[in-house]
Image (cartoon, grey):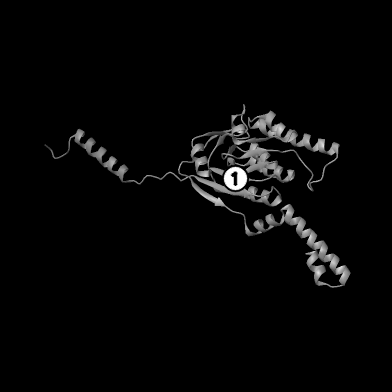
Amino acid sequence: MNGRPSPRLAALLSFLVVSGTAAAQPRTPTPQPVVYSADVDSIIHPVSAEYMIETMARADRDGSALVVFTLRTPGGLVDSTRDIVTHMLAARTPVAIFIGPSGARAASAGFLLTIAADVAAMAPATHIGAAHPVAGNGEKMDETMAQKAAEDVAAYARALASRRHRNVKLAEEAVNNSRAFTDEEALNASPPLVDLIAVDVPDLLKKLDNRTVTRFDGNRVVLKIAGARVIPIEMTLRQRLLSAIAHPNVAYLLLSLGTLALTIELWSGGVLAGVAGGV
């Protein structure tokens, strides 16, 4: 023996040293996926459009795995709907529209938003459709204008449904014939109008985990959202205030009160009523 370890023993000692060093190094934890969740319970108008667009932009900046909009709406403005859809189709983050909770609806503009989304989901006992355009003031349009508006929206619905591989015929009927569809009718159509039925947002996320979603540009994305941290995104105080004022009933009431106040000033010659009416 010359006091030096044999080659075999030296190799064994080196392996043990390397293994011990590797075991001592901490493993990099897998980042927790983040899902942004926003609640849209209003008419689709410029304020709700701003809220949805800002939510999608924030999700893109923060690298969110998914945006879920829980939608309940009787409809809204076509221009605001188009603004939302335009940003939805260009968003880097997949967007899911969830009609819920049970008993809710997404009519008119809400129908277009639903069929435009990367994921369209409904809660049990909800319905979508009835997307025939009407005048903003509720009055009947003349025949030519009504036909032009209906054909324009119908073509828009067909384009969205076709690109999303959803039922083009039913999408057109929702516009031209004001058809509405329950959750089961929408899911069981061939091809379907929506992708799945879920009880609530946690159930939706559970069913979407590991699901492959085809984006509007044709790219496929596998949703890895198991154990995701759900971050609620709420309207700002300004948006909540403007959204309440923008409701047609409230806007009509304020307009009526303002007109009444201005009339009182003309009759009485006062100042306060006129200023209040103008505001």
Crowding at mark 1 (Cα within 10 Å: few <14, some 14-19, many 20+): many
- Compare residues 6 and 86 and report the one nearer the observer: 86
Q: Which amino acid does label 1 sit on?
A: Phe
Q: Which residue carries the number 1 mark?
A: 69
x and y percentages locating residue 67 in the rendered image: 57, 44
Residue 131 horizontal/vertical position (percent):
72, 38
Q: How many marks?
A: 1
Is 115 situated left or right of 133 in this image?
left
Between 244 and 164, the one nearer to me in the picture: 244
> In the drawing, does residue 153 fall left or right of residue 17?
right
Q: Position of residue 78 (x, y in %)?
A: 74, 43
Is residue 262 visible in the rendered image? The answer is yes
State the residue in front, 120 or 170.
170
Q: Which residue lies furthest to the left in this view?
A: 1
Which residue appears at 45% of the width and 44% of the height? Answer: 227
Does 113 sit left or right of 136 as displayed? left
Residue 63, quarter of the rendered image: top right
Using the image, determine if residue 203 lies above or below residue 188: below
Identify the residue at image location x=65%, y=35%.
181
Location of residue 45 with respect to 158 vertically, above or below: below
Instruction: Label 1, secondary structure: give it.
Output: strand
Residue 134 drawn at (x, y percent): 78, 42
Q: Quadrant of the N terminus?
A: top left
Q: Which of these two is toward me, 170 or 4? A: 170
- Can residue 218 be spotted in the picture? no
Which residue is pictured at 69% across the width and 52% down the height? Answer: 47
Q: Quadrant of the C terminus?
A: bottom right
* Location of residue 140 with respect to 238 vertically, above or below: above
